[in-house]
Image (cartoon, rainbow, N blue to C red):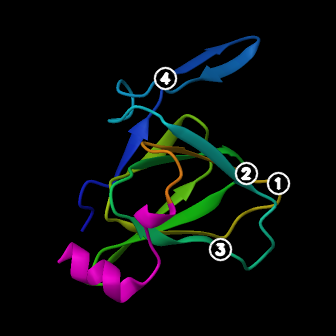
Amino acid sequence: MSRGVKKIDLPKFEDRRGNLSFIEGGRHIPFDIRRAYWIYDVPGGQYRGGHAYRTQQEFIVALSGSFELVVCDARGRTERYFLNRSYYGIYIPSLTWRQLTDFSTNSLALVLSSGAFDESDYIYDFDEYKKLSL
């Protein structure tokens, strides 16, 4: 089902001072980073996302806490990814429906995008998404 959705492990350096991980666009993820945003303080039972992008690609990583990423194709088949570590994330290509759920207390989701914010790139209607994706 994945249509290119994949887990990507990031570099992780460990020593007595603590751990360090990083992301470089075009090297660790398959796009140059044009925008970064983060999701936090999500009330219990709420979700984020519930849309797809026409052209933008994203990479999502849990910097703190945990949450679940649910991706869905146009036929309604879903895959679930539990994110709870800062040294890996999920790459999401364009035309992939996504929703983030089950945020733990004090969770922090970092989202890196291939494009600047563009409201016209969003697809909020699942029927429209199916027409564009099939």
Per the model, the C-alpha gap separating discs 2 and 4 is 19 Å
Mark 4 element type: loop
Residue 23 percent coordinates (x, y): 50, 27
The answer to whether any part of residue 109 appears in the image is no
Mark 3 element type: loop
The residue under label 4 is: 11
The nearer-to-camera label among 3 and 1 is: 3
Examine the rendered structure and indicate whether residue 85 appears above or below residue 50: above
Q: Is residue 109 magenta?
A: no
The answer to whether any part of residue 19 appears in the image is yes
Going 74% across and 11% down the picture, which residue do you hit? 16
Residue 19 percent coordinates (x, y): 67, 21
The residue under label 1 is: 106
Going 67% across and 70% down the picture, which residue do you hit? 102
The residue under label 3 is: 47
Q: Main secondary structure of the magenta part?
A: helix
- Tell me the number on the disc at residue 65: 2
> Counting residues from the N terminus, which is met first, the one under dot 2 or under dot 4?
4
Q: Quadrant of residue 82?
A: bottom right
| CB under 8 Å between discs 1 and 2 | yes
Q: Residues within 10 Å of mark 4 (few under 14, many from 20)?
A: few
Q: Residues within 10 Å of mark 2 (few under 14, many from 20)?
A: some
Q: In the image, which residues are magenta?
A: 119-134
Q: Amino acid at mark 1?
A: Asn
